[in-house]
Amino acid sequence: MPPETFSDADILAARGVKNEVDPLRPYSMLVEPEFCIDGLVEDVATIFLSNRECPFRCLMCDLWKNTTDERVPVGAIPEQIRFALGQLPAAQHIKLYNSGNFFDAQAIPPQDFAAVAELVRRFRTVIVENHPKLCTDRVVEFQQLCGTQLEVAMGLETSHKPTLSQLNKQMTTDDFARACDFLLSHDIRVRAFVLLRPPGTTEQEGVERAIESVRFAFSHGADCCAVIPTRVGNGIMDQLLLSGRFESPTLRSLETVVDTCVAEVSAAKESRRVFADLWDVQKFSTCEHCVVARIQRLEQCNLTQQILPSVACPHCVDQVVGR
């Protein structure tokens, strides 16, 4: 069944209520290890900034839950970062994730760029998230202020054009490619987010298209791809699940995508990385007996960028897809 088209109004009408956030505090923060581009495993501090909601109402997005309705005051974002750095252990790299687009002037006030840059310039890499259509000279200006390696994480979601057009993301694969070209021309690295089984796809299609999407991102210069299982929880996705128009992918499918893409990178001897997004990933398992072992295996795959022995489970009812 082909995916349907949903408008901003449809998506907004299906939502629940937002969580209350403090404009002077990040809504979450953490430090975790990551396999870096140079082959080292180093700590990355991630600060989840509280700011205004993203103007793009993507069908599958639930990041709006921790956002404000209005732009935060000038000075609030530096204060959030300052507070988080005072609480977190030392790290070599930093992610400033703001539930939307770092270079949306209604989310992160450009007047704060200099103060933010001063706070993060000591890190080896500064990673922000942004929509391909908002990759403009403002990104280059921020890079120059930071004086360190800037990396922009963008949601490709899928390189399958008909599916991408149904996600209300208001971009095309050509937009993604143009953004990559622009960023790379200014020595700004690219990280991509790829969805596993967006609405309107079967399990087999979900696996095949996720693999194709990782290849597409790499072919346009991304050096890191995170594969994200499409999940419910934002309202409209729950409606699609209940009506039979969406099914969550399985944990085994996530393993298949990551194993295939890691193997391809290794065979090509490329300095690229493929990560499984493991947030709440236990929900995608259909076997309680092997879920912990499978998650631990994916964690190690993320940290080593090597394919580890498969988990054998006599109880498992998951079907191996795409092999």
Image (tube, helix red, strand yellow):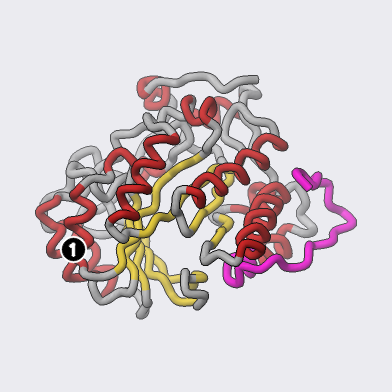
Q: Is residue 174 above or below residue 123?
A: above
- Residue 286 magenta-drawn? no
Between residue 96 and residue 241, name the one nearer to us: 96
Residue ID for mark 1:
144
Q: What are the residue bounds of the magenta stretch?
A: 298-323
The amino acid type, in three-letter code, at marker 1 is Gln
Query: Does the image show residue 265?
Result: yes
Question: Residue at the location (72% across, 58% down)?
Answer: 291
Q: Is residue 51 left or right of residue 263?
A: left
Q: Position of residue 19 (x, y in %)?
A: 35, 45
Q: Position of residue 165 (x, y in %)?
A: 47, 26
Disc 1, SS: helix
Between residue 261 and residue 170, name the one nearer to us: 261
- Residue 301 magenta-drawn? yes
Q: Position of residue 294 (x, y in %)?
A: 71, 61
Q: Is residue 178 left or right of residue 278?
A: left
Question: Residue at the location (23% across, 38% down)?
Answer: 69
Q: Position of residue 76 (x, y in %)?
A: 16, 57
Counting every numbered tag in the picture gives 1
Residue 123 quadrant:
bottom left
Question: Residue at the location (63% across, 69% down)?
Answer: 300
